Image (spheres, rainbow, N blue to C red):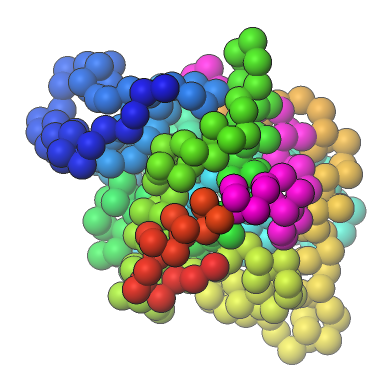
């Protein structure tokens, strides 16, 4: 198996990306280090491993996306609870328009992945042209690291919610997801996938750099950046919903609290509720280009600590050692 590029080659790659852009994204992709092993080969762009087909949509985000001060951006590392966060954020911010009852969009045909526009996913509801036309306040989502978003995200003062997860659980969830997308003759082996993940070779990885970029931004701008762990939502979803509502500047009123609205939001957006709906089990969510993902693939277990059912003690220690080394001194612990 090919090895990840050295630090010097990473620097060279960053220099290439920082130069004047080639004539097309295809020209750029051809200059980047490429490596296989996951469902599709990835290329190293500005020190992150990315789907090469997605680059033509990622690069314009940094160059042309114009954040508004009242934007809300939901940023997540893949398989860290993106679907749940989208459902919660959409329900909290639109509760004045959509009653938490049988006619709610999430209960009548809309998948959580479809109700929040994704910055780097070219769907009818979520490409940059469509996002530019969205009325404010805009609720947006991304898997991009902070360094691939425009500096104006910080300068504009828009709010960012970042959601991460215990890396061992995030890895297990990604391994399942990748194998569902894998079209090869045999599945991606668990131990080989774990080695790649520990090297920092995974989509939108290295995972530790992704986490740390937003963690440092949260330390620098605590009023505009809310940093959450999946485990926090799982442990006390009602309190997290209250936190989100306050952060979104739409706190629950005393009357809403009396009526149990925060609890209703949690119930409506729960794993059991959403995963059991017929429209979330059949059909696909188009992710642009050749990427089509089955709607049911966004609901697996959602359990904290599921890694214990998959990893040996040696495997867990291998990833724990990476976590300890990469997050040392940052204040971010798992």
User: Going by the image, does 150 lie left or right of 278?
Assistant: left
List the single residue furthest toward the top: 185
Residue depicted at 53% across the width and 17% down the height? 290
Residue 275: x, y in percent? 83, 45
Q: Residue furthest bottom?
A: 254
Question: Residue at position x 70%, y 40% from top?
Answer: 298
Splitting the image into 4 quarters, where does residue 48 fall? top left
Q: Position of residue 282 (x, y in %)?
A: 81, 28
154 in relation to 308, above or below: below
- Rendered residue at 83%/86% (across/down): 258
Residue 214 among magenta residues? no
Q: Quadrant of the N terminus?
A: top left
* The quarter of the displayed image where residue 209 is located: bottom left
Q: Is residue 314 magenta?
A: yes
Q: In the image shown, does 55 or 235 lie closer to the viewer?
A: 235
For the C terminus, the image quarter is bottom right
Q: Can residue 137 be seen in this view?
A: no
């Amino acid at each position: 198996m090919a090895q990840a590029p050295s630090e010097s080659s990473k620097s060279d790659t960053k220099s290439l990306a920082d130069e004047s852009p080639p004539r097309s994204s295809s020209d750029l992709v051809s200059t980047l280090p490429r490596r296989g092993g996951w469902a599709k080969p990835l290329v190293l762009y500005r020190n992150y491993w990315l789907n090469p087909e997605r680059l033509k949509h990622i690069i314009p985000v940094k160059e042309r996306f114009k954040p508004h001060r009242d934007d809300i951006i939901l940023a997540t590392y893949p398989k860290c609870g993106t679907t749940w966060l989208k459902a919660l954020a959409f329900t909290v911010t639109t509760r004045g328009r959509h009653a938490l009852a049988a006619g709610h969009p999430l209960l009548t045909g809309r998948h959580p992945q479809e109700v929040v526009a994704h910055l780097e996913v070219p769907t009818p509801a979520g490409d940059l042209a469509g996002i530019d036309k969205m009325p404010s306040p805009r609720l947006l989502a991304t898997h991009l690291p902070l360094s691939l978003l425009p500096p104006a995200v910080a300068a504009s003062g828009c709010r960012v919610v970042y959601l991460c997860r215990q890396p061992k659980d995030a890895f297990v969830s990604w391994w399942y997801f990748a194998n569902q997308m894998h079209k090869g003759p045999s599945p991606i082996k668990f131990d080989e996938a774990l080695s790649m993940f520990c090297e920092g070779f995974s989509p939108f990885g290295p995972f530790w750099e992704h986490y740390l970029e937003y963690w440092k931004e949260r330390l620098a701008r605590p009023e505009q950046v809310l940093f959450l762990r999946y485990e926090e939502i799982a442990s006390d979803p009602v309190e997290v919903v209250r936190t989100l509502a306050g952060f979104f500047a739409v706190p629950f009123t005393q009357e809403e609290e009396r009526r149990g609205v925060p609890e209703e939001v949690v119930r409506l957006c729960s794993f059991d509720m959403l995963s059991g709906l017929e429209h979330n089990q059949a059909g696909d969510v188009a992710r642009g280009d050749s990427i089509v993902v089955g709607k049911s693939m966004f609901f697996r277990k959602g359990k904290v600590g599921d890694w214990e059912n998959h990893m040996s003690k040696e495997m867990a220690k291998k990833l724990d050692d990476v976590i300890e080394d990469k997050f040392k001194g940052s204040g971010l612990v798992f």
